[in-house]
Amino acid sequence: MKIEDLHAAVLRGDAESVANGVSESLQAGADPEALLKEALIPAMIEVGDMFERGEAYVPEMLIAARAMQAGMQVLKPELISAGVEPVGRIALGTVLGDIHDIGKNLVGMMMEGAGFEVVDLGVDVPTEKFVELAQSGVNILGMSGLLTTTIPAMPVILEALEKANVRDKVKVIVGGAPVTEAFADKIGADGYAPDAASAVRLAKKVLGIA
Ligand code: B1M
């Protein structure tokens, strides 16, 4: 499949065509990195831009991200064997006491779409797990919280990172409906994003790659 057809299949959220297209292209000798960087990632950037302009909504973004992931399933082993490095590693989790994960998962899909390696910590994630991941060497910790009663877990995690002497080793970004820029500033996070598309831009910004 041609690069532009693969790009178009991600944009229209056609997971089957994306997976088959990636598979056919690899069999025909295409470079896995080119498929990622010239078709899949640009398509997700375009979906993110459309979302920010109000030309696409959460369902369209989710469907495109799922199509992208269908392609990534086929592409991942090839990228690993070709030694293609992710742009960064991010651990994403919904904070303690909170089981909302639709937004977090969408953020994770968009991050993968942008070339990040995502470690999904799931929901109801205890403080110690975030600290453990910071110690493991991820570049970014991403915390999601959807309840006014659970986002106070975020400053607790930041304090625990300080105590464990790893706060300066990791960037911390936060999001979720009740989270605001002012809250992120107050607790000393490195950034806040209101939606999945801007979370990707923020992740690149805090790592100094955009
Ligand atoms: Co709940 N819930 N819920 N719920 N739920 C809300 C959040 C609520 C606003 C509904 C309401 O009352 N109007 C309310 C919270 C009120 C408050 O605290 N201010 C609420 C409540 C009260 C509850 C329960 C307490 C209800 C009860 O049992 N009495 C309970 C709590 C359970 C718990 O967590 N302990 C509960 C349970 C549930 C379900 C399990 C039924 C279900 C969750 C299913 C799931 O996630 N697997 C659920 C749902 C679906 C919702 C609503 C309807 C939708 C949330 C959602 O998925 N939005 C929600 C009402 C609403 O938002 N309209 C509600 C779509 C998603 C794409 O958006 O998650 O905001 P969002 O994510 C966005 C951005 O916020 C941002 O990017 C995402 C994509 O653009 N973002 C980040 C998110 N994380 C980010 C991280 C980043 C950056 C950006 O960086 C790391």
Image (spheres, helix red, strand yellow):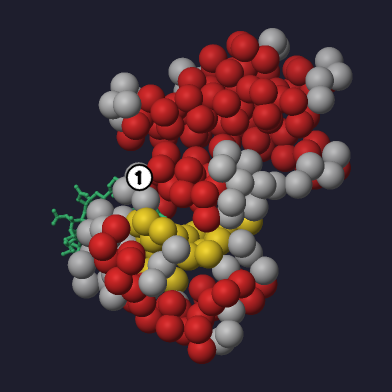
Residue at the spot 43% in from the left edge and 83% down from the top edge: 159
**Screen quadrant of the C terminus:** top right
Q: Quadrant of ligand 1?
A: bottom left
Please indicate, yes or no, whether residue 59 appears anywhere in the rendered image. no
| Element under disc 1 | loop
Q: Is residue 68 above or below residue 2?
A: below
Please indicate, yes or no, whether residue 12 appears anywhere in the rendered image. yes
Residue at the spot 69% in from the left edge and 10% down from the top edge: 2
Mark 1 and ligand 1: say if the CB distance to the nearest ligand atom is below 8 Å.
yes
**Screen quadrant of the N terminus:** top right
Q: Is residue 21 above or below residue 63?
A: above
Q: Which residue is mark 1?
A: 195
Q: Where does residue 10 sit, x and y in percent of width and height? A: 53, 22
Quarter of the view holding residue 39: top right
Question: Mark 1 packing: few (<14 Cα in 10 Å), some, or many (20+)?
Answer: some
Q: Amino acid at mark 1?
A: Asp
